[in-house]
Image: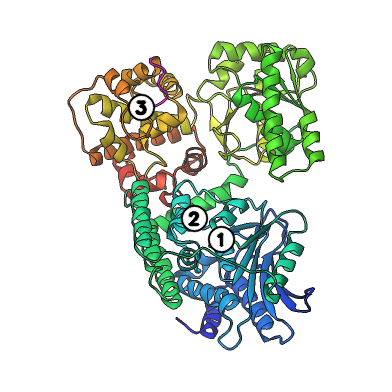
Amino acid sequence: MTDINTLLADVEKLFTDDEVVTAAKLQKVNLPSGKVLGLVTLDNGHDHTRPNTFGPKSLVELNTAYDAALADPEIDAIAVTGKPFILAAGADLTSLQAGGPDGIRTIAELGHAVFRKLGDGDGTTKKPSFGFINGLALGGGLEVALHADYRTIQDSVPAVGLPEVMLGLIPGWGGGYLLPNLIGPAKAAKVFIENPLNNGKVLKGTEAFDLGIADAIFGGADYLEQSLLWADGVLSGTVEVSREEIDRGEAWDEAAKNAGFFAWAKTGDASPAAKKAVELLTLAKTASRDEGFAAEDDALVAMSKTPQLLASLYSFDLVQKRAKRPAGAPDKALAQKVTKVGIIGAGLMASQFALLFVQRLKVPVVMVDLDQERADKGVAYVHAELDKKLAKGRASQDATNRLKALVTASVDYEEAFSDADFIIEAVFEEMGVKKTVFANAEAVAPETAVFATNTSSLSITEMAADLKNPERVVGFHFFNPVAVMPLLEIISGEKTSDAALATAFATSKALKKTSILVKDSPSFIVNRLLGRFMGEIAKIADEGTPIDVVESAFAGVTPMSPYQLIGLVGPAIAYHNNETLAKAFPERFYLSENLHKVVEAKKASFFGADGRTLDPEVEALLTVGDVVKTADEVRQQTLEAIADEIGRMLDEGVAQAAEDIDLGMITGAGFQFWNGGITQLLDREGISEKVTGKKFH
């Protein structure tokens, strides 16, 4: 491992970019016992909307703070924490790119050298150390705390994890070695292999504590004060810290093997980062700390040379930059202020809308349904969800009461909508029904009110055609579950005004959603591509390829296998989407009679209770041919169909650019970062050129 002074000199030579530096502020805290704690607070000088990150200059700042704390004879122990709500969000990926190939190794080794000073000292002096996880802690943000001797965590922390594998990287600053040696290999595999491959899932503060990542958990505004008192107890011997003993025998080997099986099932052996993460987990059983960290350095350098990393950086740029400035969105100055939201319907989807709108916009929200009982049931759902948040300590009683008071129910359109600025429908997916409810709302709503439809496939233009003011109708398509999925497709009908679009984009931003502008067309972007995908695999299965072969063909392409996806969205919804598309494009979209039989039989899935084995009752319904394809043939045929559909969508102007298609598939359908969504994968494998005659990028 390179000497830290050499690494610091290399930083000056290799990195000259305009990094947003995270300062490391050292202050002395006098503890009740008389001991002095050197508290290092990470703070990039921005509010909590811009998290702390570690670029090369930030690491130099942290190194300086640690050196000062270790050299100060008055300081008995060291702790690291972050600015309010955030410890750190990991490495500054933009900054990492600036150093070129040599910079990757420099930053990998420097991160290790600086971080380990907290736990190991500087080779001369070692002081007890603490990590106070007071907020978001991802990647290097968690690793900086893992190097401490002890950790506390705030119970309300929203995101803890090591998501690097999702980005085509590996935990490169100690996570791959320290975490399994702290909480055991099976739990560690969940954090840095399974969760990243499950669409970047993260842990909440309580979950991280339950896994053993932290030694103590505190809540409330005085979290830091409680942590300081706890640390004082540890230093003075009045608090004992006990941890579960790690089994370093066959259990470790079994956990590593299971992690390998999981990674293969999720990626089809197509993710170098997933394979490397499993190798690091295996190595951590016997390696020394130096060996483990050196292996992480080598792995990070190796991952930096893979096409998957470039695709990941492309994806990262989409969700961090393009998502904040939606392509084609009109001037935001045209947006009108939303002071009241009306919701047509009070079912589950409508209730999820009401919860989201009232929490984010904090304006009156009224739900209207056919009878008072249904409408009241929707309000009851919102109240119950708010109460859950209160019970978990994530909201105050006063704030909860205020939000509850903003949500009401009615059966009277005029009473509900006469002063509403934004009215969204969440009724049955049938054109006649949607036209009727909009006509009823238009009769009583202000002329400036924007009408939004959550349709997943129907024409915005047709839906608005019979209204007096069709220009105020806009598509506002959420993805389920509403609170979790980031994407919102905003669809412009032929007559939709810029003012209505601007209001839709402004509302989406207030809801903290990722928006893409879509031209009015059947099923829009995400569902159109998923429809072509599911139609193609249904055709292949109906012709005779066994479903288990079809299922195995897409590991590493889609976030879940095709028939699992059908089970998730529901056979009826999947069939309805393809029915719409087959009607619009009968020459390309296949409508499966077997899927129709499953819908008619009211089956929720093709599989039995285990989620993997074909349900015998479903199997008895299916009529299949005798054309059997291999998994590779299934994959190739289906990806060619997707490439063809993307080419057509771009030619038709359905999406602004290939980037918006990828942004939609990543945030709306869970496609992997390390593939670059879908178009980068198609380019990389030569499928784009084969089908369309050119690459998408």
Q: Residue 381: which quarter of the image?
A: top right
- Displayed quadrant of residue 588: top left
Q: How is the image coloured?
A: rainbow
Magenta residue span? 601-607
Identify the residue under disc 3.
606
Please state if 436 lies on the left or on the right of 630 as rendered: right
SS assignment at label 3: loop
User: Disc 2 on helix, strand or loop?
Assistant: helix
Q: Residues within 10 Å of mark 3 (few under 14, many from 20)?
A: many
Residue 445 locus on image (x, y percent): 75, 17
Q: Residue at x 62, y 10 (%)?
A: 436
Front of the two marks 1 and 2: 1
Q: Is residue 605 placed above or below 556 in the rendered structure?
A: above
> Which residue occupies 59% across, 63% down?
141
Q: Earlier in the sequence, mark 2 or mark 3?
A: 2
1 or 3: tag closer to the N-terminus: 1
Asked whether the beta carbons under mark 2 and mark 3 sit within 8 Å of each other, the answer is no
Q: What is the three-letter code of the residue carrying label 1?
A: Ile
**Left or right: where 608 falls relative to 659:** left
Callout 1: few (<14), some (14-19), or many (20+) C-alpha neighbours within 10 Å?
many
Q: Marks 1 and 3: which is nearer the front?
A: 1
Q: Does the rendering let one see residue 40?
A: no
Q: Amino acid at mark 3?
A: Phe
Labels 1 and 3 touching (C-beta < 8 A):
no
Q: In this image, 230 relative to 270: left or right?
A: right
- Disc 2 versus disc 3: distance between alpha carbons? 30 Å
CA gap, disc 1 to disc 2?
10 Å
Q: Mark 2 highlights which residue?
A: 191
Q: Is residue 388 above or below residue 413?
A: below
| Residues under numbered marks 1 and 2 in contact, where contact means CB atoms less than 8 Å apart | yes
